[in-house]
Amino acid sequence: MKKLYFNYVESFKDLSKEIWYLSLISLVNRAGTMVIPFLSLYLKKDLGFSNNEISWIFVFFGIGSVIGSWLGGKLTDIIGFYKVMILSLFLTGLNFIVLQYMASFWGFCIGILVTMSIADSFRPAVFVAIKAYSTSDNQTRSVGLLRLAINAGMGIGPTLAGLIIVLKGYNIIFWIDGITCIIAILLFSYLVKDPKIKPSETRELHQNLDKNVVYKDTSFWIHSIICFLFGMAFFQLFTTIPLYYNEVFHLNEFKIGVILFLNVVIIVVFEMPLINYLEKQLIPVTKHIIMSCLLLTLSFLVMYQNFWIGILIISIILMTLSEMLGFPYTNKFALSRAKEGLEGSYMAMYAMSFSLAHIFSPKIGFSIIDLYGYQVNWLVTAGYGLLGFILSYWLFNRVKKEKS
């Protein structure tokens, strides 16, 4: 037990104070993100939308995410990640407060489009911030700490949200989402100072750099497709899976929140020590991506069985293990490929891969459920993971040849 404790503590060593501050801010922000995990239930139960209408709202959610990721990357290369993060968090807070007043189908579509366009401009900026405030030796652990904070917040958020919804209804959680975004930005501006080197100065040091190099990187394109497929499967956790828990297993919002909290507990307790251990093994990043896709595939294959509620626990554990490898190491691969001065463009493409999945994953998922039922959807979703596994193996071989 003592050895385990020291290994856990060691995984946090040598991380910069800025990374710790970014993680604290992300914890506050994500703890307040209570709407998203229950959005599909809110749209169906409170606003009375059909599965088809809900799927279209998630399409607008995804389109907004794509716009935000692209815009965030471009602005990060122009004005720097610091200003992008400040603007994004503040305006997102205001938008979440307004979103609760959108009750019509088209009103909510437009509201979620605008909200996500602003909110997801934060993502490329924070990825670049990680690179700015970490070294090559602790970059993956920096990503891990940030994810730990995000997941701790996401665990607190849905669990509290489930209880609040049961007691007080949905409207109050929109206020909580908005206010915590604004609190997070105040903390950020106070604790983390704008770095002195500006993007324009970095570009002057690399005048001959091809600005379109990201679009000519075949291996990065393969990686982006893998991330898209990973997102197609994983984002079912926030769209169709809560409805599946509710409609097939008759769980209320609080019980759903408890199951989602299991995901967070595993990540908070085990992800950082796991990453610290794996980093010492010098295993190629692409091998971790292969394993994450395999685990994600298995998590949906086991959910094909619907006769025992325990299968939900097995599925969420497999999905969590996949997430613990998938997100840190796809992020590390993207950061390692990014050319200096164009980090925003690389991280925008990385973020857009997941944003595109936000568009197609719920639309296809809900359509399959309406036509063929949940079990067929889990088989199709497992297929995304399997295709990602095959492409990951191809990427592993390509990168191996590049280095030889």
Image: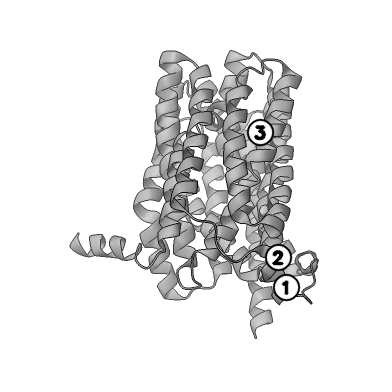
Q: Residue at x 66, y 71 (%)?
A: 340
Q: Disc 3 designates what residue?
A: 115
Front residue (pair 24, 379)? 24
Front residue (pair 336, 58)? 336
Question: What amino acid does circle 1 point to?
Answer: Glu
Q: Quadrant of the N terminus?
A: bottom left
The residue furthest left is 2
175 shown above or below 156: above
Q: Disc 2 designates what residue?
A: 200
Q: Residue at x 68, y 22 (%)?
A: 51
10 Å crowding of disc 1: few (<14), some (14-19), many (20+) = few
| Residue 45 locus on image (x, y percent) | 58, 15
Question: What amino acid does circle 2 point to?
Answer: Ser
294 shown above or below 253: below
Left or right of residue 235: residue 156: left
| Residue 204 tag number | 1
| Residue 290 locus on image (x, y percent) | 58, 62
Left or right of residue 172: residue 60: right
Q: Quadrant of the C terminus?
A: bottom right
Depth check, mark 1 against mark 3: the one in front is: 1
Question: What amino acid does circle 3 point to?
Answer: Thr
142 shown above or below 169: below
Depth check, mark 3 against mark 2: the one in front is: 2
| Residue 189 locus on image (x, y percent) | 50, 47
Q: Quadrant of residue 28?
A: top left
Q: Which tag, 1 or 3, sits closer to the chain's start?
A: 3
Distance (Cα) linking label 2 and label 1 = 6 Å
Q: Residue at x 40, y 64 (%)?
A: 15
Q: Are marks 2 and 1 in contact (CB under 8 Å)?
A: yes
